[in-house]
Image (cartoon, coloured by chain):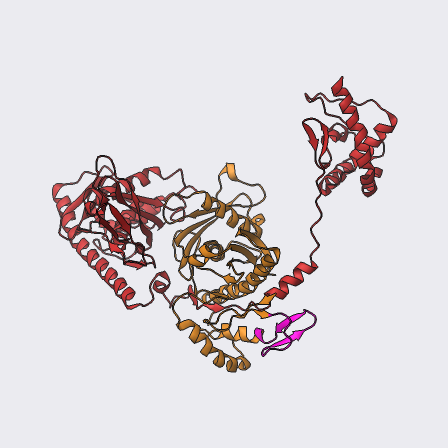
Amino acid sequence: MKETPLSNCERRFLLRAIEEKKRLDGRQTYDYRNIKISFGTDYGCCIVELGKTRVLGQVSCELVSPKLNRATEGILFFNLELSQMAAPAFEPGRQSDLLVKLNRLLERCLRNSKCIDTESLCVVAGEKVWQIRVDLHLLNHDGNIIDAASIAAIVALCHFRRPDVSVQGDEVTLYTLEERDPVPLSIHHMPICVSFAFFQQGTYLLVDPSEREERVMDGLLVIAMNKHREICTIQSSGGIMLLKDQVLRCSKIAGVKVVEITELIQKALENDQKVRKEGGKFGFAESMANQRITAFKMEKAPIDTSDVEEKAEEIISEAEPPSEVVSKPVLWTPGTAQIGEGIENSWGHLEDSEKEDEDEGGNDEAVILDGIKMDAGVDVSHIGSQDAPIVLSDSEEEEMIILEPDKNPKKIRTQTISATQVKAPSKKPVKKRKKKRAAN
Amino acid sequence: MAFLDFRGGSGRVQIVSKRRATCGRHSWSPRVGACVRRTHLVRKRALLGGSNKPRLHVGSGAMEGAMQTESKIRADSRTEPGPRGPGCSLRHFACEQNLLSRPDGSASFLQGDTSVLAGVYGPAEVKISKEIFNKATLEVILRPKTGLPGVAEKSRERLIRNTCEAVVLGALHPRTSITVVLQVVSDAGSLLACCLNAACMALVDAGVPMRALFCGVTCALDSDGTLMLDPTAKQEKEARAVLTFALDSVERKLLMSTTKGLYSDAELQQCLAAAQTASTHVFRFYRESLQRRYSKS
């Protein structure tokens, strides 16, 4: 679907509001929206909500052979997908620019910053290493996808547990989840992206732009930082020209924000771990709010299936037995056999349909839908008895026979049921004719 | 021939001979030619009525007595945390609607640990190449959690699309498109049924006109022929056959069925009958969830 264009008055309104330091949702210039993190039942699954922007993250692992030039390092694979439910404009062919940009930024933020220790992912050097795959799905687009995605990625990686492996000499043992507790990944630091939107050629700036604000912004500056105030990635796009002190100011703001967000992430992870250890209920079902009228839960309910057998028997006894299918192949010539009679060839009526009335046309359809073969039989019997010449069509196929139109087509159609009996034996003379011609 | 007795969560399935004339709760019914449990209707209503829902639930005085005696049994079956005993019960259900701001309708449906998020866009503009002159073009997209979508997702999309096309009144919106996007959030068994339920709730939330609601129910038959409804991933893997049905809400008729494995025609009819019974419960869940949302009290 095409994106709904932004109207001029909406654009002007937004820009005027920003000039007066007002935002549509009432936030201040440097305020982030509410961040909510919820975890699923399997390790490595989380949903992050940044305001209304929602991202699902899942981490999975697999044992593979390492890359040739990096024989002792594990492999990291990141994939962000813009699901079609996130925005009507996200269609499979249409989102390539944005998608490539986001994926590349995410990769630089997580892979090049070496936040995950890839050496620890090595099992047997040169032969088997862990491949960690992070899949992110954008579920709802309300602006600032990159921040939400980076938070989801790092939270999922911190939450993930890989199966335990032990190497003794040449033997490698991979323990299942039941045998040994899974092991977390070794993560050095948590880089988080912070986005700054610039308006009016860099005069005004907003942190965490919403979708409307993103549409009217001039440029975007993304700074990926960790809580130790180390910049992992910095990217400026949109062609705005920023001054040095602007960039420095942004990095200071980013430092403060990242510390807050990292605290939130740590708290969420600790909570989840505590709940799992104590054996309480965890997962998305628990994080669903009870008080909302749009949410509803029902406990597990037993179903009475004691009368299932009786019902089934009733149905089977009342049902008609399946029709007997007896296939009798008839061999005409070596290499030509026939099973069944087939339905009526309706092409033969085409030339004659112009002469017939319009009512006939209606009758034709009804007859063909029934699938009753009748005309063929009756016409053929006529031909067989009268020995009339058979008109061949112009088609390339030599075996094609066009049946002559009958004098009283209506009468034949009502004789459908009786005609079937005539059909079987009468087919043979026609076929014999065909054979003769083939021989000639 | 046997009938299944599911009493309580920890009870084993008892195979009872069909020709037993008298047993505690049953009476011989000559018409059907088998033991018929006469009291099951009252008890089922009581069981469903007694769960912890807000006051809006309608209950009669006669059922209260039954509810109290049954609540004890229910409490027992609920406190056991692990897998359900053999027999038939549906897992814990939860549904949230309208949770995404961009799609016209959205719903998240949870069945035990299986969770699917559905978003619906429509009726909306359609590409010329895909438009149908007299009805709406329905499109279903299913995305797995990890990896690229493959053939299994394509076939599930087709099944869900056929089900939706049977109920959605596409003729009211010709030359438009209705897109249902499903995202698997977690998969712990009965995935297709959960997708169908999520799709239905999302279509209701979007206000797409439909002639009936539909629900998905999965049955599994294990090697002894025991029937299990709403199987977990482990039960599905060990089952001899897994059957998924889509049923409509008006007359519990069959909209779609897809099966995997080996089973006899009698077993098929039994699974279908069991699914129809289970679908009553699912439709009650839909109704109460929508009542909660739209009622004034």
How many labels were placed on the picture?
0
Question: Viewer-proximal residue, B68 or B125?
Answer: B68
- Residue occupying the point 22% across, 59% down: A264
- Residue occupying the point 38% across, 67% down: A290
Based on the displayed image, in which of its 4 quarters is residue A75 positioned?
Answer: top left
**Residue B39 shown in magenta:** yes
For the question of whether residue B249 can be seen, the reply is: no
Give the magenta-colored segment's residue range. B17-40
Q: Would residue B38 be found to the left or right of residue A244 on screen? A: right
Residue at the limit of the structure toward the top, as seen here: A440
- The picture places residue A127, in percent across and down from the top left corner, at 26, 40
Q: Would residue B231 be found to the left or right of residue A232 on screen? A: right
Question: Viewer-proximal residue, B187 or B19?
Answer: B19
Q: Quadrant of the N terminus of chain B?
A: bottom right
Question: Viewer-proximal residue, A325 or B164?
Answer: A325
- The picture places residue A193, in percent across and down from the top left corner, at 22, 48
- The picture places residue A211, in percent across and down from the top left corner, at 32, 49
Above/below status of A336 relative to A99:
above
- The picture places residue B244, in percent across and down from the top left corner, at 52, 55
Residue at the limit of the structure toward the right, as seen here: A386
Q: Colour of chain A?
A: red
**Residue B114 shown in magenta:** no
Above/below status of A419 relative to A36:
above
Q: Colour of chain B?
A: orange
For the question of whether residue A400 can be seen, the reply is: yes
